[in-house]
Image (spheres, helix red, strand yellow):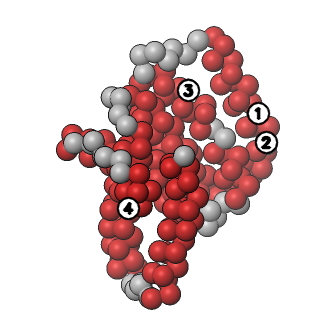
Amino acid sequence: MVCVAVARWRMDAGREWWPRLAMLSMTGNIIPFSLIAWAEQSVPSAEVGILMALMPIATLILAHWLLDHEPLTLHRLLGVAVGFVGVLLLVGEDLFSQTASGQWPGQVATLLATLSYAFNGVYAKRLPPANPVALSLGSLLSVACLGVAGAVVAAQRAGLGATVPSVTALLVLGALGTGVATGPTLLW
């Protein structure tokens, strides 16, 4: 946000854009991040990564249904089939043995996160033309507002309180990790 202010970019998103930005925030950040964080309590990270490989396949199928200019052609269908077989080969029989061992809720949560990411990409493509910087900024603002509100509610329900070190760590990681990493990209 500092980079946007320094470069004096205007956010041309009117009121009609905020519900769209909220949808982008929910499907591209809040829902998948929450589901993956929960899933990784029972599913190994490597398996989560492999299950996330289904995202391009899900995106292709959703694009066929939701976008007029993205039909599912024979070549694309073959690509989906090859991709699906590839994921099955990577996961192999471990997927089915772990399903029996009680990891299936985490696996389902990971697949739902994958679908959320896929829907996000297709939804973003359906949006009317807009300034990409304004779109990114609005989406980040929306994620920040919705995410903080959700985190506060979840923390209160869990009986957790914010401490000075935890809030400081959150601010430093957010400002340095995201701001410094993406800021120069936006300015140049």
Residue hosting label 4: 144
Query: Residue 60, labelled with which disc?
Result: 3
Residue at image coords 52%, 79%: 169
Q: Are the two marked residues, 2 and 1, in contact with CB atoms closer than 8 angstroms? A: yes
CA separation in Å, label 1 and label 3: 16 Å
Q: Position of residue 163 (x, y in %)?
A: 44, 88
Q: Mark 3 or mark 4: name the one nearer the start of the chain.
A: 3
Mark 1 closeness class: few <14, some 14–19, many ≥20 residues within 10 Å: some
Q: Position of residue 50 (x, y in %)?
A: 70, 46
- Please state if 7 lies on the left or on the right of 95 as rendered: left
Residue furthest left in the image: 15
Q: Amino acid at mark 4?
A: Ala
Q: Mark 4 or mark 2: name the one nearer the start of the chain.
A: 2
How many numbered marks are there?
A: 4
Mark 2 closeness class: few <14, some 14–19, many ≥20 residues within 10 Å: some
Q: Nearer the viewer, residue 116 or 105?
A: 116
Q: Secondary structure at mark 4?
A: helix
Q: Position of residue 180 (x, y in %)?
A: 56, 62
CA separation in Å, label 3 and label 4: 29 Å
Q: Amino acid at mark 3?
A: Leu
Q: Secondary structure at mark 2?
A: helix
Query: Residue 86, labelled with which disc?
Result: 1
Q: Amino acid at mark 2?
A: Leu
Q: Are the two marked residues, 4 and 1, in contact with CB atoms closer than 8 angstroms? A: no
Q: Are the two marked residues, 1 and 3, in contact with CB atoms closer than 8 angstroms? A: no
CA separation in Å, label 2 and label 3: 20 Å
